[in-house]
Image (tube, rainbow, N blue to C red):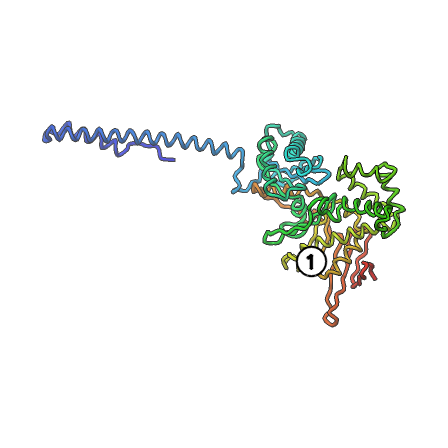
Amino acid sequence: MPEKPTHSSAGLTHDSTVDDARESGNFSSKKKGKKVKGARKQAETAVDEFQLRRDLRQQTKMTDSVESAQAEVTPASDEPKFSEDIRIGGIEGGATHSTLVILDGNGTRLTEVKGPHTNHWAIGINEAAARLSTMIEKGKEQLNIPKSVPLDCVGLCLSGCEEETTNRQLVQTLLQSYPHSARDYVISSDTLGSLRTGLESSGIVLIAGTGSNALLINPDGKTHGCGGWGHMMGDEGGAYWIAHRACKYVFDDIDDFVEAPEPISYIWPAMRNYFDVTDRNGILAYLYAKFDKSIIAGFTKEVAIGCEKGDPLCLRVFKEAGQVLARHIIAVSKKAHNDLKLAPGGLKVICVGSVWQSWKFMEKGFVGEIHDKCIVNELSLLQLTTTSALGACYLAAEKINCPFVKPYDSNVETFFHYKRELYPDTQTAKPVVVELGNNTAICDTAVDVRENGQKT
């Protein structure tokens, strides 16, 4: 801001010139006239300068007020924010439900809200924005935050948010239609939210929930994906895929089109009971007229129950699920940096989704596929011990430069470890499998895996 003017040089020149012109008798009237005119001109210049300074001060005040107003709406990102008054949200949105977590500026969890699925490809941008805003407002209400006060930033890690164009549309809709929900957003796919919950920057996340999706993030920030194309083009190893495959075996077997690899004596009655039908025609309504992907995927629970009972066809389906999930890892691991491959424990893979609850039925197919392809020498499968909405919160905190300690190690635990050891004398590979978790044993010696995945 310009300094406040005191006695300007222009003013002093005006006074001395006029006095000299009046008091000196040696000047001609012509010269006196010139000096008086010059003095008046300088006086006018001085007045203009004062006015200019006043104008500049006024403009500065206006600029300061505008910048102050903008700062209230969007906090400056170049200065770290530590205030406990900061409120950061994170939403993890899957194909069946969503979870919101709100943290303060120190990373302390304040509240958690459950909500419906928020995949905009299934329900549209406007409906997705409405559901997200409703969850945020419910969280604010639980914390007694006035409706007119938005959260500082909300991270959105949602199913279906892999495309930048539609991501921007969703954020713009939220900001325009629900301006009091949050001041700013950061948006990405649900896979990134899961990875950032358990790993600081790089690794692999493999989702096997209703659908399936794999994402690799290298230390340089570059990403590579496999799958995530939805039930029409992929989702191999996800709950919908498992349920559909089980039903397909039954349909083809009854048609005598393709004989099922194992008897359908459990799955066919389970299908009739689950869908409450008497024949296959009744199931068609669930596949077409009143299609709901989550309802179809729900039948996977019945298949898992069949595995518990030892049904051969159910066990076959889950073994196949383990094989196709392993192929996701094989695909992205080809692009993984050596820093990830050579880290203690090998490639770190965060496994997310309800299908992983049936890991014991998928393990043989998974290990057999990894071993046979000879691409991955060592890997560790990790599961989250908390909601991946925390990863969305971490992304939001970084967006507004709000640093706090993130407890990555306590957010995950290792439930399976695979290692392939090369023997120089034979140049043959034998895997060392270490299973971690409840009711499992640790094997320190090498074990062999046959083609069908059975250990010897």
The mark tally for this picture is 1
Residue type, numbered disc 1: Gly
Q: Is residue 238 visible?
A: yes
> Percent from the top left, x then y, of residue 191?
67, 46
Residue appearing at x 75%, y 61% in the figure: 372
Q: Is 318 rendered above or below residue 444?
A: above
**Viewer-closest of 95 and 59:** 95
Residue 409 in the figure: left or right of residue 241: left
**Viewer-closest of 454 and 57:** 454
Q: Which residue, given by chain and number where applicable, does mark 1 sit on?
A: 346
**Viewer-closest of 421 and 191:** 191
Tell me which corner region of the image, top left, top right, bottom left or bottom right, holds residue 389.
top right
Tell me which corner region of the image, top left, top right, bottom left or bottom right, holds residue 445.
bottom right
Q: Residues within 10 Å of mark 1 (few under 14, many from 20)?
A: many
> Percent from the top left, x then y, of residue 397?
60, 41
Residue appearing at x 14%, y 29% in the figure: 32
Tell me which corner region of the image, top left, top right, bottom left or bottom right, holds residue 434.
bottom right
Residue 11 in the figure: left or right of residue 308: left
Q: Is 435 rendered above or below residue 16?
A: below
Element class at badge 1: loop
Q: Which corner quadrant holds the N terminus?
A: top left
